[in-house]
Amino acid sequence: MTTFTPTTSAETLSTIAWAAAEDSPLEILGHGSKRGIGRPQQSEHTLDLSNLSGVTLYEPAELVLSAKAGTPLAAIESLLAENGQQLAFEPMDYGPLLGGEPGRGTIGGVLAANLSGPRRLKAGAARDHILGIAAVSGRGEAFKSGGRVVKNVTGYDLSKLMANSWGTLAVFTDVTFKVLPAAETEVTLAIRGLLDDHATAAMALGLGSSAEVSSAAHLPERVAARVAGGSLGSDAATLLRIEGFGPSVAYRIAALKDLLKNAGPLQEISGSVSYSVWRDIRDCAPFADGSERPVWRVSMAPAQGHLMVLALRMQAAVDAFYDWQGGLIWLRMQQDDPEAGLLRGLIRKHGGGHATLARATPAHRAAIPVFEPQAPPVAALSARLKAEFDPKNILNPGRMAPGAGSATLAPATEGGAQ
């Protein structure tokens, strides 16, 4: 096995062209923070992009940043913070959940997995902020899409097409993202002690108000103690985040407290504690326990999520918490994972959705569909895309589905199985 470590786009192109000519599969790797997601790799060689790094353009006044694909996300976020800006979709860091170090993700991996965080309700995911890419297809051909401006009409938006493809269609060499100003003030209103069904109703009430809630999550009893160093205590916490200018935040928090005064005991959380709470929710910290116990990431209708979890608990021991107003559910199985069919069957019974196995042993990941199986028409479309971009199946073969020609794209609603 050979590990290729290109430092330029030309070297990346040369490596992939060689692999295509030799029919030699490549595992595509940044710093490996998401290596444990998907089926175990079936590759002879590794294309390590960690040396393809560096910010190539940053214009704070124009809200645009370009970087080579292997640039650490942590470095980009630090640069933006120095200028009072951010990636508004607050991409998740999978490292701790998968037993790795925090801060090891790359900006290319952000788009490849279409990452997002608790602010997705308001800001969307990576695909909603990408402006342009430079990439190399599995044919060994370089191509570009989009540009460095917010408005571009250059044809098919391949930048968004590549989101959630997990390196199975092309390899990014450069990416350009839209950035936004960071909020001056952040305050979280916590409603304490609610059961899942009441929490779902409270989150819906908050999101439907004029308070402009940017994030809504529910941490059931005992799960709450696993975020922000235990500062929330063990009682269930239903969390609503308000962001913006100080006076506006204060006014909206007061309005939200009045709206929810009968929901349960209220608690204001501000400053670094609020930031830590949402960072830990983003990174699934309650389940980052160093084990390989299966963790599922489920996306479904917010009103149905808690009902599905209740039905699942009748048949399996499971821990759960909710993000995106209950539309994103993180599940940790306490014992041997039940059949994936059980979970996906319950999801279908409760209105449909998507389930991705975010953490498990390699044997487990090889035995079941890690990503949500696609409907036949969508699977056929994915196969045609794979045939166009990577006809010899040399890029991350078998990661998303077994067998040659596995061309599936993860559903956009999942945000990159996270």
Image (spheres, rainbow, N blue to C red):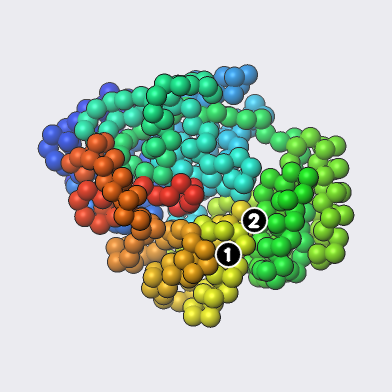
- Please report contact status of discs 1 and 2: CB closer than 8 Å, yes or no: no
Asked if residue 124 lies left or right of residue 174, the reply is: right
Secondary structure found at label 1: helix
Query: Compared to 176, does 278 lie above or below?
Result: below
Q: Position of residue 196 (x, y in %)?
A: 66, 68
Q: Position of residue 379 (x, y in %)?
A: 31, 51
- Tag 2 or tag 1, which sits nearer the N-term? 1
Give the total of numbered labels: 2
Q: What is the residue that sits farthest to the left in this orientation?
A: 22
Q: Which residue is mark 1?
A: 305
Q: Give the residue at x 14% y 41%.
A: 23
The answer to whether residue 337 is seen in the rendering is no
Asked if residue 270 lies left or right of residue 375, the reply is: right
Specify few, some or many for label 2: CA neighbours under 10 Å numbering under 14, 14-19, or 20 or more: many
Between 226 and 308, the one nearer to me in the picture: 308
Q: CA distance from mark 1 to mark 2?
A: 10 Å
* Kind of residue indicated by mark 1: Gly
Q: Give the residue at x 35% y 56%.
A: 375
Q: Which residue is mark 2?
A: 325
Specify few, some or many for label 1: CA neighbours under 10 Å numbering under 14, 14-19, or 20 or more: many
* Kind of residue indicated by mark 2: Gln
Asked if residue 319 lies left or right of residue 198, the reply is: left
Q: Give the residue at x 46% y 46%.
A: 412
Quadrant of the image occupied by residue 200 = bottom right
Between 86 and 417, the one nearer to me in the picture: 417
